[in-house]
Amino acid sequence: MKYMRLMVVALLSAVLLISPVYAKKEKGGKGGNEAQAQASSPDRSGSNESGDKGGKQSKAEKAEAKAQSKAEKAAEKEAKKAEKAEEKAAKDEIDQANEKAKAPKGASKEEKQAYKDLNKSLKATKKLERDLLKAKDDEDIAKALDKFENRASKINNGQRVSTMVKVAKSLGYSASVGALQANFGTPQETGIKDLQDQITAINEAIATLPGTIDGLSALAAELQTTTEAIAGEITVVEQDAATQIADINAQLANAELTEEQVADLEQQKADIQSNTAATVASLETDLANTLGELSETTADIQTAETNLADATAALPGVEAELAATVDEVNIGNRDSGWTTVDLDTNGDGEITDADIVQ
């Protein structure tokens, strides 16, 4: 019995000893779980915040990229729009330069045929210009020129048209310039070049003659001064000779002179008269020459003044004649610039392949 009590006491003691341990363990476990939860919770919170921040940055970048892409597309669209506008303007210019020409009312059969030939030429040059506009490389350009050659060969005076078109293009002009001149005349053939040369000469005269007149006037003044100086020198020589001769004559009046002295004085007198005559003759020759040059210079001044007056008076008339000729030669409602383009680059009077500027 005593033994049983001891066993019960021991059992109870063991239970009492074990219970706090379990309590601590449970408490500790609970605390551990809470600590673990707390430890993990901030990490998750930090991770989420970081993730949220990263997400916001990505959106900003996307927005910026989107805006940049939109701007690039807009710029590209504007560039294409400008390119199309430029291309349209070039086509319009080509169409205008190669605009079909209508024969005037009452035109003769020959005149109508000339306009018909011209329009065929303009049609060919229009296609050439459009092909060149679309050309991307030298091969395309060569093809465009070959096609033009084929078209030109099928029209009247096709070789003349072809040559003049090549020359015009090599000089940077529209192909229509060559076609128009091939059919309606070059400046040399229409008389425009001659009128232009006249105007150039007149303007040059108007610009240079005043200076020429001033130069001649200065020369005339110098020659006039020279003539006066020569005339004065002649007077001095003659007066000096007269004084010397008068002195000798006074000496000869002395009756006491010997024959030898008289002869010596007479010789001196003769020498003075001879030298004076020679000197005066030379001076008078110089004077005559100077007066002759002065007379010529004065005449040149009068001629230059007349030429200047004539040139000034003639200029308006020649300019009016040139304008009328250009208006007469120019056909259709187009820019008349083609009428004055000089395709004769080597100045030999003919338009050939030799005039093509390489």
Image: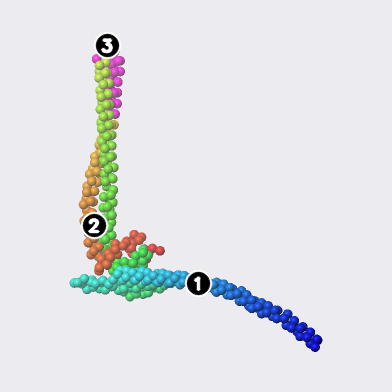
How crowded pointer 3 is (Cα within 10 Å; few <14, some 14-19, many 20+) is rated as few
> Most prominent secondary structure in the magenta stretch?
helix
Would residue 132 be visible to someone looking at this image? no
Q: Quadrant of residue 100?
A: bottom left
Q: Which quadrant does the N terminus fall into?
A: bottom right
Residue 13 vertical placement versus 194 (above, below): below
Q: Report how far apart the C-alphas of labels 3 and 1 lie in the structure.
A: 148 Å
Mark 3 and mark 2 lie on one chain; the one further toward the N terminus is: 3
* Residue at the disc numbered 1: 56
Nearer to us of marks 3 and 2 is: 2
> Is residue 258 highlighted in magenta?
yes
Residue 133: percent from left, percent from top: 37, 71
Mark 2 highlights which residue? 319
Whole-percent x, y for residue 267 in the image: 29, 20
The span picked out in magenta is 253-281
Give, as a three-letter code, the residue at label 3: Glu
- Estimate the spatial distance between the alpha carbons at disc 1 and disc 2, rounded to whole Å: 78 Å
Q: Secondary structure at mark 3?
A: loop
